[in-house]
Amino acid sequence: MSDASDRPAPVVPPQGARKRKRPDIVAEAIRDRIMQSGLSPGDRIPADWLDTEALKVSRGTLREALKVLEFEGLIATKTGPGGGAFIAAIVPENALRMLDNLFLFSPPSIADIYAIRKLLEPELAASAAGGALSPEAFAALEATIRLYEAEPLSGEEEYRQRMAELDFHAELARNSPNRLLGFIAVFLLSLLRDMTVCREIYREPHPELRETGLNYQVLLLRAIKAGDGPRARQIMREHMVEAEKYMLERAVLRERPASRP
């Protein structure tokens, strides 16, 4: 007979912790099994994994658990002949949208975003110069720049060109050999696009800014084409510092009350 001291201590949730719902617990158990099984997108989840008696849950709880996994983009369910639950290919855009929603009501500051961009994007640029970009990816970056080479004919066209400038950075991030680094960089760009204050700043006429951004990106492409990683890193670092300075200055100006006549 074992001594009571040999028994594992019960897990006590921290005070104030939210009690997890049964469907969430079941969803996590199914998710763990999927990860351990090596199933791939398109594969059917074995029926015995979803057996209510084996899981010791009701049909309603299982349905809710599957809805959780479907909402997260991990599975897709089909009805009718040949139906069931299948592993889904998670789309990066959907994951980004969920992360955006996390900051929907409490967005980070522009300074917070650029503090990270100044660290990450120079490394993206250096890795691109190190041979990470395919000829097709390099051509895509060049095509993005061409979208705002010409002078804009209207405020709306200038705004679209500002978005194209962000697209350049997103294209560079999507082609990073470090997928995690690229994903984080794209996420930061997504936050900038969604922030109201940034949208207002991007809509302000500022032809000098367009020329500055275009110049940095042309120089960057030259460094990448030459395979000069340190130069590419330096150019991107300078670009991020200048962009941060401009965005912060414009944000401060927008916060100032309008002067009375």
Image: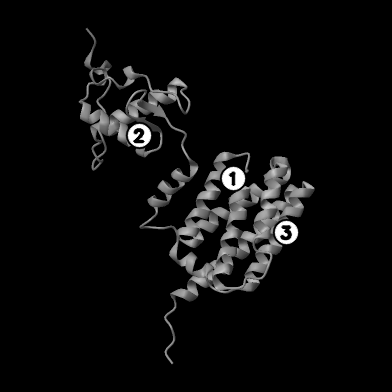
Q: Quadrant of residue 48?
A: top left
Per the model, the C-alpha gap separating discs 1 and 2 is 26 Å
The correct choice, above or below, for 34 with respect to 244 in the image is above
State the residue in front, 228 or 142.
142
Q: Quadrant of the C terminus?
A: bottom left
Q: Quadrant of residue 12?
A: top left
N-terminal of the pair, mark 1 or mark 3, is 1
Q: Residue furthest front?
A: 81
State the residue in front, 59 or 33.
59
Count neighbours of disc 1 (C-alpha within 10 A) and say few if under 14, some if 14 to 19, many if 20 or more: some
Instruction: Report the residue marked by disc 3.
Output: 218
Instruction: Report the residue marked by disc 1.
Output: 174
Tell whether 141 sits left or right of 183.
right
Residue 260 x %, y % = 42, 89
Per the model, the C-alpha gap separating discs 1 and 3 is 19 Å
Q: Secondary structure at mark 2?
A: helix
Q: Amino acid at mark 3?
A: Val
Q: Amino acid at mark 2?
A: Leu
Tell whether 1 sits left or right of 133.
left
Give the residue at x 44% y 24%: 43
**Which labelled disc corresponds to residue 69?**
2
N-terminal of the pair, mark 1 or mark 2, is 2
Q: Amino acid at mark 1?
A: Arg
| Cβ atoms under marks 3 and 2 closer than 8 Å | no
Give the residue at x 39% y 32%: 75
